[in-house]
Image (cartoon, coloured by chain):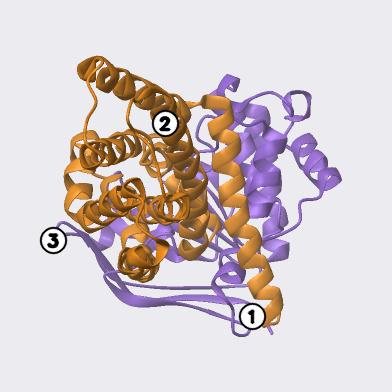
Chain colours: A purple, B orange
Amino acid sequence: MALRLTGQGLSKAFNRRPVFRDINLAATDGETLLIAGRNGSGKSTLVKILSGILTPGSGTVTIEGVGRLDELSRKSLFGFVAPYLQVYDEFSAMENLQLCAALRGLQGNTQAHEALLRRVALDPARHDPVHGFSSGMKQRLKYALALAHQPRILVLDEPMSNLDAEGMSIVREIMREQRSRGILIVATNDLTDIESFNGKVDLNARS
Amino acid sequence: MPGARGTAGRWIRAAVAVFLKDWRSELRTRYAISALVMFVVTTISIILFSLGGEGASPEVLAGMLWVVIFFAAMSGLSRTFVMEEERGTGMTLSLLTPAGAVFAGKLLFNLVLGSGLTVLAVLLYALLINGFIIKTMSIFLLTIALGSVGLAAASTIIAAIIARANTKGTLYPVLSFPILLPLLMTVINATRLAADGVPLGEAVGEFQILVSYIVVVVTASAMLFEYIWKD
C-alpha cells in the first residue's frame, strides 16, 4: 500500500497570534510537496507540525499505508534537515550518527555511517569534533543524520542554506533519490532549490 | 511492524541513549560536575570557618548538611535540560526520540549525578565538620538513598519547566524550594534521628513519606513531561 501523508485543517498560533489557518495538504509515494511563502509566513512551523515536532492548534496530520505505528516508529518515518536543527557539537560526525541511531532505538551500522559521510563528502573529518565544522559542513552532516535510517518522508526546510556548489549538487541528487523512495517535502522561498514538484502549499495566499 | 517487546526494547534503548549522551557530554564539558563539586567544597569550607572550633547540635548539623546538598543540586542538576535549550538541540532530541524516553534518560542522568553529589557532600561533611556523628547508620544510609532519588526526581521535572524561561538561574531554586520543602523537612528530620541513635523502627514514618514523595513526583512528572517538552 502506498504511503500517504495528509494534513487537514491545520492551524497554528503563537501567543494568540495566528501563523496560518486551515491548511490542507497531501502527498503520496514518489511525490514532492513544495511549501512556499515569504519570511514569517509559517513554512518552518508547518514542516515542524508535519514531522511531529510541534502539535497543531487545530487539525490533524495522518499517515496512511504504514499500519498502526508506535511513537518511535512514526518518528523514524521522517528525516528532517533545517538550519535551526542543531547537532551535538562536542561529538564527532561519526558519534553524532551513532547517537542518532541509538536515540531512534536502532542499532548503529558503522560501515553504513561511513558510506553516508563519504556521500556528503565529510569522511575526511568524520572523527573531528563538530564544533570545528563550518556551517556548510554542519549542514552536510544534517543530511547524513536525516538519511541514516532511510526515511520514507524527507522534510527539507531551506535545503540549500549554507551549502557551496558541491553541497547543492549532492542535495539535488538526494532529492531525486528520495522521490523514488517515498515523499519529499521542501519548504523554501527560492524555487531554484527544487527541480519539480507535484503539489504546492502557498502560505502567502493564506495569511 | 515491531511487536510490543520490540517496541519496549527500542524505547529502553532510546532512553539509555539519552542517558549515555548526557554522561559523555558531561565528561567532555564538565559543566555540571564542576559546578556541583565547587559548590559543595565552597559551602562546607564556609560552614567550617563559621563554626570555628565550636560544635553545633545534631539538629543544626543535620539541617546544614541538607542545605549544602540542596543548593549544590540547584547549581548543577538543571544543566541537563538547560544545555539542550541553550545549544538548540532540544528540537533535535524531540524529532528523534519520544518524550517519555527523554524524561527517563534525563532522570537517570540526574539520579547518577545527584547520588554522586550527595555521597561527596556527606563524605566531606563527615570528615571536616566537628560533632557530625551518626549513631544509627541504617537510618542515615536509607535517608541518603531516598533523599537523593527524591531530589533528582523533583529537580529533573523543574529543570524541564524552567529550561525555556529567560531567567533560568533565578527561577530554578525559587520554583524548587516549595516543591522540595516536604522532602527537605523529612530528610532533615530522618538525619537528626540517625544522629540521635534511635532504632530503625522509629524512622519508618519518615521513610514512608519519602517513598510516597518519590512515587508522586515521578508519576506526575512522567504524565506531565510530554506537555512541557513538546511545545
Measured as percent of width and height from the top left, residue A76 is found at: 62, 63
Q: CA distance from mark 3 to mark 1?
A: 35 Å
Q: Is residue A144 visible?
A: no
- Of residues B51 and B186, which is closer to you in this image? B51
Q: Which mark is residue B24?
A: none
Q: Give neighbour class at mark 3: few <14, some 14-19, many 20+ (Cα, 10 Å).
A: few
Identify residue for label 2.
B126
Q: Which mark is residue A66?
A: 1
Identify the image quadrant of the N terminus of chain A. Answer: bottom right
Residue at position x 37%, y 64% in the image: B214
Establish whether labels 2 and 1 are both on one chain.
no
Eyeballing the image, is B128 above or below B191?
above
Q: Give neighbour class at mark 1: few <14, some 14-19, many 20+ (Cα, 10 Å).
A: some
Measured as percent of width and height from the top left, residue B92 is found at: 50, 48
Identify the image quadrant of the C terminus of chain A. Answer: bottom left
Q: Give neighbour class at mark 2: few <14, some 14-19, many 20+ (Cα, 10 Å).
A: some
Chain at numbered mark 2 = B
Identify residue for label 3.
A16
Nearest-to-viewer mark from 2 and 1: 2
Q: Mark 3 falls on what kind of element?
A: loop
Chain at numbered mark 3 = A
- Of residues B126 and A16, which is closer to you in this image? B126
Q: Say whether residue A136 is left or right of residue B205.
A: right
